[in-house]
Image: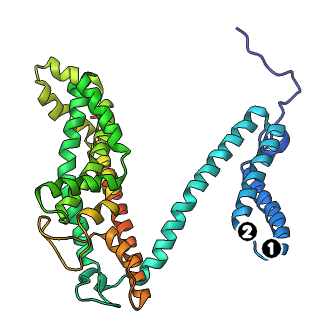
Amino acid sequence: MTATTAPAGTTPPVIRPSQALRLTSGRLPKWAPWAILAASAAIAAVVIGIFAISAGEFNIGGWAVLTAIAYLVLITVISSLVEGRRKGVDRLVTGVVATAFAIAMVPLVSVAITVVVNGVAGLSAEFFSSSMRNVVGEGGGALHAIVGTVLITLAAAIISIPIGIFTAIYLIEYGNDSRLARGITFLVDVMTGIPSIVAGLFAYALFAIFFEPGIRMGIMGSIALSVLMIPVVVRSTEEMLRLVPNELREASYALGVPKWLTIAKVVLPTSIAGITTGVMLSISRVIGETAPLLLTAGVATSMNYNLFDGRMMTLPVFAYSQYMNQGIPAQAYIDRAWAAALVLIVLVMLLNLIARIVAKVFSPKLGR
């Protein structure tokens, strides 16, 4: 085999780095999308500004929409002309996905900023150290609501987690697509979509059978929340158990290990990270419920540590009652409502952070 060499006296062409970024090279430079976005924003600002002269107000929402449309059109046309039709379609789809993400983030960021700005005004040492007992107007705090939220949610988790995990274990390990398993799956799907007020009515009706009508207790709120938590725990645990390779089960069976011990020592430890994440997310889903707790736990102004005796306040109900039943001065009630909402959001964020930490710590380590 002979090697091909360049003719004597000739040198191969040298491509300079600056030439690789030219539009004629068939590839847009990295700064081109951002430049197109800036140009689209400028064009949209001019158009919206013309209408703002007559309307008297610059429409920020219209400017954002027009900017997105102009960017998608320009990036698709320019990329198709320079890079080809396939790359142009790829940039169009990328722009649509990025736009959809930005639209989804708008309400989240807006709510977060609004709650933080308005909630900080109501935060104080008294807010975390006192209740609303004998407080009218300014002063008072939400300690009784924070304690009630923790106790009711903890009791709901104690009820829901074992039931949800054992149900998922039966469906995956023992159900074998039987009629009972299909029926349970159907009921879990139905429970996933029930309104939260229905769960509250169920708990209220259940306790009204054994006690007098009109009773309110913290444990009633826990049962109502557990009705909402169980299907989430079942579904998340199901998906995690499905991800466990069958080879691990078969290897355990080949060593003579019973099925129940295989589940306890092999299947659950392998999927514990995902199961913990699903449990934490289910707790985050119910900790902010208001309607079922209004029916079951009721409204209280004093500290109550007993789930089985008397009404118990929670943060969602506290925020609702403070905002809806404003006294004098009204601003004090509004500040307490926003502060309770901020504390509730912080609790949910902490739960999600704990879920991520647990998932990272307990996830199976590779390369052992």
- In this picture, residue 56 sits left or right of residue 207: right
Q: Are marks 2 and 1 in contact (CB under 8 Å)?
A: yes
Q: Residue furthest top?
A: 1
Above or below 321: residue 159: above
Instruction: Give the labeled residue for mark 1.
Output: 55
Q: Residue furthest right?
A: 9
- The label number, if any, that marks residue 59 in the structure image: 2
Instruction: Please state the horizontal and vertical placement of residue 206, each as a whole percent of the image.
Output: 18, 53
Residue at 34% x, 56% y: name it. 197
Quadrant (top left/top right/bottom left/bottom right) for the N terminus = top right
Residue at 67% x, 40% y: name it. 93
Give the crowd class for mark 1: few <14, some 14-19, many >=20 residues within 10 Å: few
Res. 80 in view: yes
Dot 1 amino acid type: Ala
Element under disc 1: helix
- In this picture, residue 276 sits left or right of residue 262: right
Q: How is the image coloured?
A: rainbow
Instruction: Please state the horizontal and vertical placement of residue 145, each as a whole percent of the image.
Output: 26, 73
Instruction: Please state the horizontal and vertical placement of residue 289, each as a whole percent of the image.
Output: 34, 60
Instruction: Please state the horizontal and vertical placement of residue 244, each as a whole percent of the image.
Output: 29, 30
Q: Nearer the viewer, residue 142 or 325?
A: 325
Dot 2 amino acid type: Asn
Q: Nearer the viewer, residue 357 or 227?
A: 227
Residue at 29% x, 86% y: name it. 140
Residue at 19% x, 32% y: name it. 266
Element under disc 2: loop
Dividing the picture into quadrants, the one containing residue 12 is top right
Res. 366 in view: no
Disc 2 from disc 1: Cα separation = 9 Å
